[in-house]
């Protein structure tokens, strides 16, 4: 009886050993699944967060826009599943900000390309009308071009809509350079129109008060690739061609894109 029990135990032990060996061999023979690389992407940050309306990816080979996104409330943007290659990022700045320069990015398979934070410069303007400060917070910046000049327009709304509405126009040479320009019409001038819809022009003078004023450009950034932007000061007394009276406008502007 003891011999039978001993043989039975020995058989069970041998069977367990063989089963364990087979399982171990099966585990070793099973190939490990290949790791799937994460799809490449592009990510970055805009500061201030609301300075850019959208970011677009441009293919450097075809120069075509592939995809665009709007930054989130924190200024973050992200492009998922981008094919490996070289691209340019184009930033569509909100009006009143200097458009950032395009950024070159290289996307590598399986990696996330992190673009350095883009800090957007805000354009500013401040001036007085007969010694009374205009409200710069509501100023709108627009550009109007002519063959030899461009016009910089500052406005705080629809003329006549409010008692303090106005449009201030500074016309200056397209080939802008640091220096002082006379606002007598060659090659620069200025006009101011208030809520009464009367336009006061720096080119209109009287026998006792000649026309004119000065526009001083203190700095110009005009190095390709664009954008171009400039800063300066201005002062002029404008007179109405068909009405009595005048207005004196004095102010500064900084980092105006043109």
Image: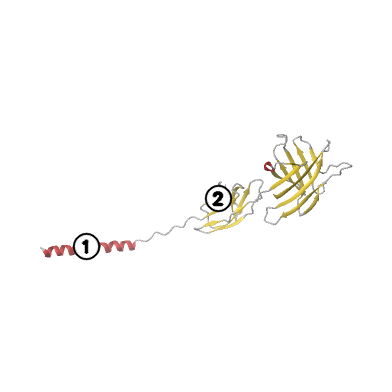
Q: Where is residue 163 drawn, in percent x and y?
A: 72, 34
Q: Where is residue 131 drawn, in percent x and y?
A: 77, 42
Front: mark 2 or 1: 2
Per the image, label 1 sits on a secondary structure element best described as helix
- Residue at the image point whose x is 15% and y is 64% from the top: 7
**Camera-side residue of 80 and 94:** 94
In the shown orientation, is residue 50 left or right of residue 35?
right
In the shown orientation, is residue 52 left or right of residue 41?
right
- Residue at the image point whose x is 25% and y is 62% from the top: 19
User: What is the residue that sits farthest to the right in this orientation?
Assistant: 207
Q: Is 65 located above or below residue 10 in the figure?
A: above
- Tell me the number on the disc at residue 15: 1
Residue that badge 2 annotates: 77
**Camera-side residue of 223 and 85:** 223
User: What is the residue that sits farthest to the left in this orientation?
Assistant: 1
In the shown orientation, is residue 207 left or right of residue 177?
right
Count of picture labels: 2
Q: Where is residue 199 drawn, in percent x and y?
A: 79, 38
- Tell me the number on the disc at residue 187: none
Q: Where is residue 87 drawn, in percent x and y?
A: 58, 56
**Camera-side residue of 48 and 104:** 48
Does residue 147 appear anywhere in the picture?
no
């Amino acid at each position: 009886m003891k011999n039978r029990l001993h043989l039975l135990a020995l058989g069970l032990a041998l069977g367990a050993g063989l089963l364990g060996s087979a399982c171990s061999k099966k585990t070793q023979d099973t190939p490990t699944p290949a790791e799937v690389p994460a799809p490449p992407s592009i990510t970055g940050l805009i500061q201030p967060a609301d300075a850019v309306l959208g970011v677009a990816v441009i293919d450097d080979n075809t120069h075509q826009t592939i995809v665009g996104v709007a930054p989130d409330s924190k200024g973050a943007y992200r492009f998922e599943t981008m094919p490996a290659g070289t691209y340019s990022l184009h930033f569509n700045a909100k009006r009143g900000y200097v458009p950032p320069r395009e950024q070159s990015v290289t996307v590598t398979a399986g990696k996330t390309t992190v673009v350095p934070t883009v800090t957007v410069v805000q354009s500013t303007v401040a001036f007085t009308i007969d010694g009374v400060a205009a409200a710069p917070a509501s100023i709108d910046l627009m550009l109007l071009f002519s063959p030899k000049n461009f016009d910089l327009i500052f406005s705080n709304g629809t003329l006549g809509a409010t008692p303090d509405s106005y449009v201030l126009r500074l016309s200056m040479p397209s080939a802008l350079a640091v220096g002082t320009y006379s606002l007598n019409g060659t090659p620069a001038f200025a006009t101011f129109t208030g809520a009464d819809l009367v336009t006061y022009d720096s080119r209109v003078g009287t026998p006792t008060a000649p026309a004119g004023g000065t526009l001083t450009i203190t700095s110009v950034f005009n190095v390709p690739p664009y954008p171009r932007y400039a800063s300066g000061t201005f002062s002029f007394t404008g007179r109405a061609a068909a009405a009595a009276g005048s207005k004196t406008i004095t102010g500064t502007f900084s980092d105006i894109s043109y």
